[in-house]
Image: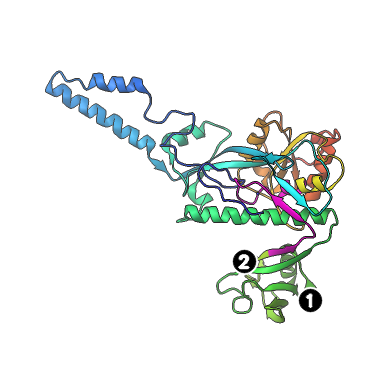
Amino acid sequence: MSSSVPPTAGIPADDGGARPPEDGARAGRPGPGGGGSRGDGFRRRLKPRTGRGLVGAVAAVAAVVLGGIVWAAPVPYVVELPGPVYNTLGTDSGKDVITIKGRQTYPAQGALDLTTVYVEGGPNSNVSLLGLLRSALDPSQSILPVDAVYPKGVTTQTVSQENAQEMQSSQDNAVAAALKTLSIPFQQQLKIASLVENSASAGKLQPQDTILSVGGQKVESLTAIQGLVAASKGKPLAVVFERNGTQHTVSITPRDSGGGHYLLGFTVAYSFSFPFTVDFALDRVGGPSAGMMFALGIIDKLTPGNLTNGKQIAGTGTISPDGSVGEIGGIVQKMEGARSQGATLFLAPAGNCGDVVGRVPSGLSVVKVDTLDAARHAVEAYAQGTDPATLPQCTK
């Protein structure tokens, strides 16, 4: 969304790809220099008749040139535009988007479209003042400060690497969530990904340690750890972990980060062992927000019948191994992209409802979801003719 080549020039991302600079103009739109008629005017104007006229002509040309430079000058903003959609039940470049080996699968019809967004500006390209004004007049586009999307000083390479890593993680999480929903057993572990400097866990845990239990409770998800830490209210917790094949126990006292929100101070990564292989052939998209649609595609392929009943349904949202659906960026552009490609139902994360209300394209129904089970139920209900207005809706 199983690894993928990160988005670079001309490649969309499900949450933050980029397009290359186009000399200050977007594809299919005139650049700030205008057309030939203005050039003809320059030539007529530059034909001197007197010394004073020459000075005036030069001054006029200089003003126009300077004005053009200002309009073409890059501005510290990014523009989000609708990107292409990909049917997780279909193919891309002649290959199945999702291929399952080692387990019986069933033909799937219809479409479960994952949606993407293009991002112009930032480390990969520039947005001109003229381009920014054009985007401000297009309701399908959003304008954001660069710093709201990219950390200061981030490079194109860093963005590409992070998008690829997030896509890989979303694919693994999608398989885990789908198998859990279908009650297909698999092995799952939590590993320390990184430690916050000077945190409660610094000096006690190390990256790649496998977390086995917290406070005497077995844990297999970040959500479980967060719940136990919150319940501790700052009291010491026994953390059992495995390092290099040896089990260890350490006591860690969570620290209050403000407002009674306690943290152990580490990030986690999931490690899975699945009973069969799921491959993804979508190498032109990066980021985390295809997870939910991947999971729905896997469920459809692993179960008899057609989940969509032949209908075209789109959506977006991150997915956790426990099936929780998370909010994403570019929801407005993704709804626009979905509708333009024929989708009639869109699955939106509940966390994005604030951006959904009042911005739904005509002809598109939107249902809010917060879990994979809720998303599956919405798809099945709509496929069987249920009025989407009777399903969970985003409200102000």
Number of residues whose C-alpha sits closer than 10 Å to that of mark 1, classed few (under 14), some (14–19) or many (20 or more): few
Q: Which mark is residue 17?
A: none
- Residue at image location 49% in from the left, 46% down from the top: 145
The one of 302 and 356 positioned closer to us in this rendering: 302
Residue on which disc 1 sits: 216
Assess whether residue 159 is covered by the magenta stretch.
no
What stretch of residues is rendered in magenta?
270-296
Amino acid at pointer 2: Gly
In the picture, measured across the screen, residue 362 lies left or right of residue 164, that is: right
Residue on which disc 2 sits: 258
- Residue at image location 65% in from the left, 31% down from the top: 340
Amino acid at pointer 1: Gly
**Which quadrant would residue 2 be assigned to in this image?**
bottom right
**Tell me, what colour scheme is on the image?**
rainbow
Whether residue 185 can be seen here: yes
Tag 2, which secondary structure?
loop
Tag 1, which secondary structure?
loop
Assess whether residue 276 is covered by the magenta stretch.
yes
Q: Are marks 1 and 2 in contact (CB under 8 Å)?
A: no
Number of residues whose C-alpha sits closer than 10 Å to that of mark 2, classed few (under 14), some (14–19) or many (20 or more): few
